Amino acid sequence: MIFGALAVLLILLALAFLVIPLLREPKEDETVDREQQNIAIARDKKALLEQQLADGQMTKEEYEDALKDLEASLALDLERQQRMQQNRLAGKWAVAVFAILIPVLSVFLYYELGDYRVIQNPELTVARAETASDPSRPPLSMDQMIQKVRDHLKENPDDARGWFILGRALMSMQQYADALAAYQRSYDLAPEEPTVALALADALAMTRGGKMEGEPEQLVQKVLQATPNEPTALWLGGLADDQAGRYRDAYDKWSRLLPLLQGDPESENEVRTLIAALRKKQPDLPQDAAPAPSPVAASGAAVTLQVDVDASLLEKAQPSDKVFIYAKAASGPPMPLAARRVVVADLPIEVTLSDRDAMLPQMKLSSFDRIVVGARISKSGRPIASSGDLYAESSPLERSKLDGPVKLIIDKVKP
């Protein structure tokens, strides 16, 4: 609103500088006086010519020629005054043209060449300048991006969307406690936003080992009451029902979710796998006539990993220890291109990492052909490696040439 008012004010000022001089007219009495002066001068010159003729200073022919010249000069002066007046009238049309064209062209050129989003997001200017100065510059790391968001929030602590973005970035780094704090702040500022409520529920569950009982389930139910077919709410709500032993309720939610996943075969496959697991727990659930889709290769931008832990290291791991499974570029940014988190109790497990698991939109598996895959049992529960972690990591692989799952046996201890 303020920007729009300032823009209108500046346009009006520009019009004032151009239009006011065109509208300014000489006073009427000044125009009349100038005409009377010309006529009076002509009369004096005529009287002088008559006196010179009477005194014999010029012949009759010379007098008549001089009189004709005087009359022609007066006629030209009067015609010039009339033409100037006509030009002033024509200038008023130019005023109308300026008054219309300047605002229209200003708005058109701004929306073609400008960017109003910079008003609320000044960091766009910095990013654009950096890209323009060095188009080959690699993208910011996740830590750098997170720091930029934190700096923005220091000056804008009531920016609900900024807190949500920070929470999403921290979740992608598996920093669940910090993500929970960011999502909680976003939820406090925008409690009616379903996306924020579901993100908060997910973060709460992740800080509790994936358990949906209590506040996470309450947040999901609140969203489902307002939007019964919200896909993420159906997904999380089904997990809450499954964990509570309400298998029929979980089946109902995930069955409603399936039609909403058309065009996302990987997610559809995962939900069908969850439904198949429900049937093992409660065999009388309805049978689904549609066959489950085959695992998705995501147009080649995916890698399937079979992960297990060596028997000699089992005593060093607890069933609840977190396992981070990842793929990263063989040469380039150290951050994972795709990652999943499970627990030791889930091993052995087969996981497919694809562009859908990308931590950054511009950093995906499909962007790199040579990759390294790995799995790490985190003793601290955090995604950052630390001494005592158990791990396995492959040598560089040509992703496009993989023709089957990559086997990873966790058999090393980080010093």
Image (cartoon, rainbow, N blue to C red):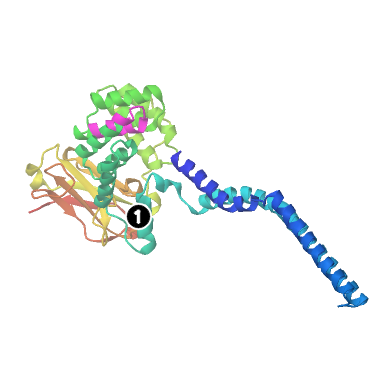
Give the camera-side residue of 56 and 236: 56
Q: Which residue is mark 1?
A: 126
Q: Position of residue 12 (x, y in %)?
A: 54, 46
The amino acid beneath tag 1 is Val
Segment tinted magenta in the rendering: 188-204
Q: Main secondary structure of the magenta part?
A: helix
The structure residue drawn at horizontal position 45% and vertical position 47%, both measured from the top left corner, is: 116
- Taking the image as drawn, is residue 335 in sight? yes
Q: Please tell me whether residue 212 belongs to the stretch shown in magenta.
A: no
Classify 10 Å Cα crowding around label 1: few (below 14), some (14-19), many (20 and above). Answer: few
Where residue 128 sits, quadrant-wise, is bottom left
Give the camera-side residue of 401 and 123: 123
The structure residue drawn at horizontal position 20% and vertical position 43%, both measured from the top left corner, is: 348
Q: Seen from this angle, which residue lies furthest front?
A: 55
Give the camera-side residue of 191 and 260: 191
Where residue 155 sits, quadrant-wise, is top left
Q: Seen from this angle, which residue lies furthest right?
A: 60
Q: Please tell me whether residue 199 belongs to the stretch shown in magenta.
A: yes
Q: Position of residue 218 (x, y in %)?
A: 28, 23
Q: Position of residue 219 (x, y in %)?
A: 30, 26
